[in-house]
Amino acid sequence: MQELLYKKFSSKMYGVCLRYSGNADDANDLLQEGFIKVFKNLLKFRGDGSFEGWMRRIFVNTSIEHFRKKVKLYNVTEVQENTIEDTDLNILDTLAEKDLIILVNELSPGYKTVFNMHVIEGYSHKEIADILGITEGTSKSQLARAKGVLKKSLEKMINKAGNNTINT
Amino acid sequence: MQKFKEKLYNYEAEPPFEIWQNIAKELDGGDNKLASRRGFRKGSKLVFYGFTAAASLIIIFAVSVFFDASKTDPGTASNLLNQSQNILPKQIQDSLNLNNKILKEIINSAKDKNLLALNYEMSSRYGKKYLTVAGPECQPVKISPKVATLIESTDNEYPPKPVWNKKIEKWQQIMLGSTLSPTSTNLLDVVQLSATLDNNE
């Protein structure tokens, strides 16, 4: 039963862990810790929502808990008003998920955590602030910085791709 | 941002095979730990019940021995207390009877009271230097034969002797002029003081 659950959900949950951890070693630890929590708390699943959603929350919380111990988030000045939305987003269609993961993992742990929680998981800034023990302003500023860094990375990719096109 | 979400929300990657082995091992170990903890709890419960039963038996045994002994043993504390309560008044009563007897002898004697008292003090017939009389609260108070005579002479039942009346009057004057007040502990000193004053005269 446990092995079946693992086989069914491990690859998805490993994706979550990779997004938050930034490296395979930490992701392996998170996956292991997360599944043990899932198996030990199976009886607590009340069937209110989807099982996958419940399991995903456990993995996100495990990841957040893991990095909360390591990372201290500082409030930074709001910067880069023109963020990813202003950038040519067509390149995103051409990029594989694996490349996007690499882009996200280039972010510093603080930016990455807020970016993952807000953009990917859909947490509000208030929820992020409560979970991470920071202010909403800090959460917003971290996200803004994360978007700025991603924009620069994407622009580099666009330029690189443009140059390659011109060269060819 | 939506494109990020679309692409990354369901991102999947194959985890290394050994992770499942680690999880399975940890789950087995956890079960063993749980089992051992349960065993420990069960064991500790048995030890607790055992100790409780042993303590109860000891208490029951001790209580039964105590009550049994109190029934059969005449030398227990309560019996001794009863005995002492019976004996003590008897001793006091004997002492008082003896004192009364001596007082009557002294008072009814035709001889000089001082002489009689002196004789009594000197004699070893009773083996006692002081008399024991009942105090105001029926407590035993030791007094000298002289004082006994003095006390008795103030009683109207016996005709007061002029010599004793003078002594008492003087003593009263001394006491009125003094901050000393006679108590059961200093009465003898007061009398002694009175005698000294008489001698000085």
Image (cartoon, coloured by chain):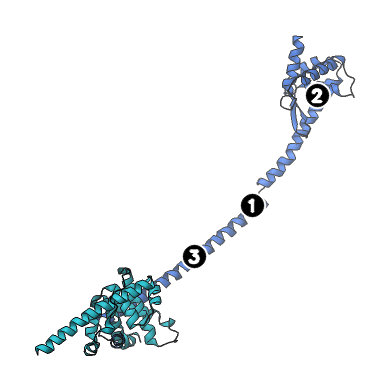
Chain A appears what colour? cyan
- Using the rendered image, report if marks 2 and 3 lie on a common chain: yes
Give me the chain letter of mark 3: B
- Of residues B41 and A156, the one drawn nearer to the viewer in this rendering: A156
Discs 3 and 1 carry the same chain letter? yes
Q: Circle 2 sits on which residue?
A: B102
N-term mark: 2 or 1: 1
Quarter of the image that includes the N terminus of chain B: bottom left
Of all chains in the rendering, the one displayed in blue is B
Q: Nearer the viewer, mark 3 or mark 1?
A: 3
Quick one: SS at disc 3?
Answer: helix
Looking at the image, residue B127 sits to the left or right of residue A45; the answer is right
Can you say whether B161 is above or below B38 in the image? above
10 Å crowding of disc 2: few (<14), some (14-19), many (20+)? some
Specify the subunit that label 2 lies on.
Answer: B
Residue B51, given in percent of the width and then of the height, sits at 50, 62
User: Could you tell me the amino acid type at mark 3?
Assistant: Phe
- The answer to whether B111 appears left or right of B57 in the picture is right
Give the residue pinned by disc 3: B48
Q: Position of residue B101 (x, y in %)?
A: 82, 26
- Name the image quarter holding residue B86: top right
Residue in front for this viewpoint, A153 or A115: A153
